[in-house]
Image (spheres, rainbow, N blue to C red):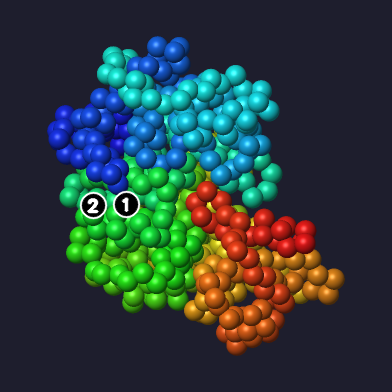
Amino acid sequence: MTDSVATILEKRAEETPDAPFLLAPDDNILTYAQVATRARGLAGWLTEQGIKPGDSVAWAMPNGLPSALCLLGILRGGHLATAINLVAGRDIIAYVLDHSDAQIVLVSEETEPLVREALAQSESGARIIIVTDDLFTPRDVGTIPDAETDALLMYTSGTTGRPKGVTLTHRALIAGGQYPGIAHELTPQDRALCVLPLYHINGLCVTIMGPLVSGGSVVLPPKFSVKQFWPIIRAHECTWFSVVPTQISYLLHDETLFEAIPSLRFGRSASAPLSPDVQTAFEARFDVPIVETMGLTETAAQILSNPLPPGTRKIGSPGVAIGNEVLIADKTQREVPRGEEGEVLVRGANVMRCYRKNPDATAEALTPDGWLRTGDLGRMDADGYVTITGRLKELIIKGGENIAPREVDEALYTHADVIEAAAFACPCDRYGQRIEAGVVLAEGSAATEEILIALCIERIGKFKAPDRVHVFPELPKGPSGKIQRIKLAALVLET
């Protein structure tokens, strides 16, 4: 794989200049030629500002055509595109701007106050630039980056301590678009709906790089909206979408009348385990197959994927390795027999180069022979399908017994009114740790804590059932929509 994001974009502009690439819900359409011209324009502007290849350029913008153009323009110039998580909070944004050595921060009028507040408490000398059309005016551009050039700096959500800066090369980003393309059989005729933020690896690699590598197109609304989700897919004849389990759950609980959409081939779920009950109910109601997958920031998104119908989709499993290698390993990183539990390891072109300025964390995560330790626990069956059983750092150890929080989650999800659920550990004098859980319920639900605990006892037994179930208006999440159990536990312990 010798291509970079820049060379692939130029090839698309040359070979299919008039094919649509980026679309806004208001019917503003940019072709591959137009996107390439604008990307070169921004790359040239950055050069005029004295920004050198390899320098960090941050962008902090909501989804939309300008955000995607900023990403592609930074990459086109060979700079390090540094993603700013808009929901991370001022302190984390300040840390990221310092740690990344960002030279410039590209913002919208909407996000400029937040970034300015963050810069005020940081030591960064980054300049804030409000993005206007002038930045994309055609300009000459210097050298084009190659596959081994560092391309993206994206910070993990940081459930504890400071977030780590994941450094991905152009090769990794291309692989991050290529592997979903293989798994989902994407063609130039396919059109994605992107409702995940581009500062998250799923939104960036799967629904921007995926269409770029396959020659397709993508619709970019500013954010996820339950009410606008299906109308946008229908109006723009989208063939697929990529979402997270919480979004699937909210769509399922929306009572708006749904009519079949002929163009839609499949939906894709990633970033967190999908409850089998939620998946089954969603497919029964909407008659849209959901392909469960798994990925990480450190792997430019996809690691595993179920095949498309009529291939075998194993409900409850994120699928098989496609593009990269995956094995289940013991504590010494040796492969365990099929069916036994171990840590999920992955190796391939999509794996990160390093954690920025953190050689110790890099050495802990990457083995000498190139395997990335994901921190996820799982089993692989005889057909190569992986089942995720938990996180090494999230296991609940009650009375010496390891309990996977997901097992409790899935028991709670069997109640029709549970939209979100997450079990977690709390300190306990008797058992060392006890099990508690947080849930979000459908509006008007009559479900009580007692009802939900009784359901868990029925499903998984009294020992694994939570002692408390807390009802919240929402659960704390990272940028991917993944529920953060550690923050939920801290929230409960504070009250």
* Residue 91, quarter of the rendered image: top right
Marks 2 and 1 close (CB-CB < 8 Å): yes
* Picture quadrant where residue 490 is located: bottom right
Q: Which mark is residue 110?
A: none
Q: Which mark is residue 193?
A: 1
In the picture of the structure, the residue carrying the numbered disc 2 is 236
The count of marks equals: 2
Cα gap from disc 2 to disc 1, whole angstroms: 9 Å
Image point 40% across, 11% down: which residue?
Answer: 48
Q: Residue placed at 66% from the left, 23% from the top? A: 123
Q: Nearer the viewer, mark 2 or mark 1?
A: 2
Disc 2 crowd rating (10 Å Cα; few below 14, some 14-19, many 20+) is: some
Give the SS element for disc 2.
helix
Left or right: residue 471 versus residue 54 is: right
Q: Residue at the spot x=40%, y=45% of the render? A: 222
Residue 243, image x and y in percent? 40, 57
Q: Which amino acid type is shown beneath numbered disc 1?
A: Leu
- Judging depth in this view, the residue of 231 and 83 nearest the camera is 231
User: Residue at coordinates 52% horizontally, 72% vertically from top-left?
Assistant: 442
- Work out whether mark 2 precedes mark 1 in sequence or the reverse, and give the earlier one: 1
The 10 Å Cα crowd at callout 1, few under 14, some 14 to 19, many 20 or more, is: many
